[in-house]
Image (cartoon, grey):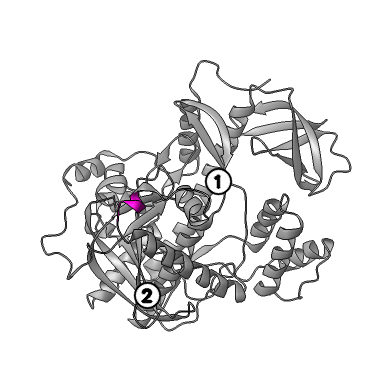
Amino acid sequence: MPHTHPTRSHRKTLQDLARRAMIDRGFEPDFPGRELAELAAIHDAALPAVPPARDLRALLWCSIDNDETRDIDQLTVSVPQDDGRVRLLVAIADVDSLVPKGSAIDDHARRNTTSIYTPAEVFWMLPEKLSAGFTSLSDHDDRSAIVIDMAFDADGTRGDATIYLAAVRNRAKLAYHSVSAWLDGQGPMPDPVAAEPGMADQLRVQDRLAQQLRARRREHGALDLRTIEAKAVFDGDALRDMAVDLRNRARDLIEDAMIAANGASARFLDAHGLPSLRRVVRSPERWERIVELAGQLGTTLPVDPDAAALEGFLTERRRADPTGFPDLSQTVVKLLGPGEYVAERPGTQPPGHFSLAVRDYTHSTAPNRRYPDLITQRLLKAALNGRQAPYAFDELQELARHCTDREDAANRVERQVRKSAAALLLSSRVGERFDGIVTGASEKGTWVRIFHPPAEGKVVSGEEGLDVGDRVRVRLVDTDVERGFIDFVRA
């Protein structure tokens, strides 16, 4: 029988599980007294007494994020030029101005290194008063920001880039789904877009440029991987469903803009003789297994790692088997290996990011949510002011290792609580039958992802003869919310 407590709210159950999971993995879910005392002394997020030299508040800045997002890290705007080129500007929240290095709040952020997003609660890296308030680029508020100003030719070829501090104002807080539907011609123009004359045109320019940038990266082997991410849907404190959070055109727009901005940040630091904290995905150590997997599906890949050949294989499989493609993507992601942070001295050759097909890459665009981005922001400010790096190189190396470790632990917490949410949702449906697809088959067991709700569980009986990609009908026989276990038998 399902292991749940019948009188507790679903939200409270998942919150408690998330807190325990965080503590078990060495995170601090709450802010101690010293941090709270420091926070109490911060009363507003007005522009500094000496404002940035550039005032860009008149530009048509906008943010595009999830519907419920309040910790807004970046704004974008496109500025077409008379010669056919386009300037893409990305404004990054100036978190460092309110969270200086060595402060109590910074020390807490340094320990956790990331916000953790669980189905029932967000555990902020910075206090919510900051990340969703004073350091958020909230709509129609004046903010100080670091602006990454990039020029592109009419065909999307990268030109010059510069970085500076500026005053900005978010003119339109937008959401992925409504913007994507509008760009695809499947929905109305979002109200905040209609309310700002010229906003629609500059968004279309951003979209066109993003598609050019993506096409160029894919020519060099950037991988178009599409895994399934299930998101909990609540009605008050009751968990009602798990919905698939699909990629869409607006998500791609922001992703491509941020990839460009992160590359520009890395090159800027190198050009100014400062070290950087690079984000890398090395050439896959398990390439032989990827080659074997492709061979089983009728495609021959080169013996040595080749991102362009792998992307060609993925494109072919996405057309041939769209239902099974997310599971193939997930397998490839695991075989590629995780990303990591690496400290790089100026003038050296970084390992690069295999999946994105870029060499120069850092994390700089989400300083409210990720500590590496806050580190990069401080390095960029040092470069702008002609100062030495605020971190010694051995300190950067240690931070790179720490941030990599904490990111892995945070992913495990989020994954564990998502599994518990799926088990909780299904706990009242024991005995029902579901259609699904086999996602794993090995000596360790056979796993199936059911289509609705999107949840994965183990086939504990009748798994003989099943292999990855097989469609199957299963019956739910047990759930364990505490451990996130879901058990099926073949129907």
Q: Residue furthest left?
A: 49
The numbered mark at residue 160 is none
Viewer-nearest residue: 242 or 334: 242
For label 1, the SS is loop
The chief SS type of the magenta part is helix
Q: Secondary structure at mark 2?
A: strand
Q: Nearer the viewer, residue 476 or 340?
A: 476
Q: Please name the residue shown 29% across and 53% down the image.
A: 137
Q: Is residue 194 magenta?
A: yes
Q: Measuring from the top left, give residue 238's x and y in whole percent.
A: 50, 25
Q: Given the image, on which type of amino acid does mark 2 rest? A: Met
Q: Which residue is mark 2?
A: 150
- Res 245 label: 1
Q: Is residue 91 magenta?
A: no
Q: Position of residue 490 (x, y in %)?
A: 82, 33
Return the x and y of residue 343 as percentages of the image width and height: 44, 70
Q: What residue span does the magenta drawing correspond to?
A: 192-196
Q: Is residue 257 left or right of residue 454?
A: left
Q: Residues within 10 Å of mark 2 (few under 14, many from 20)?
A: many
* CA gap, disc 1 and disc 2: 30 Å
Amino acid type of the residue that numbered disc 1 sits on in the rendered structure: Asp
| Residue shown at 37% from the left, 44% from the top | 124
Instruction: Examine the image and state in which quarter residue 347 appears.
Output: bottom left
Side (left or right) of 10 relative to 422: left
Which is nearer the eye, 383 or 21? 383
Query: Is residue 273 placed above or below 470 in the rendered structure?
Result: below
Which quadrant does the C terminus fall into? top right
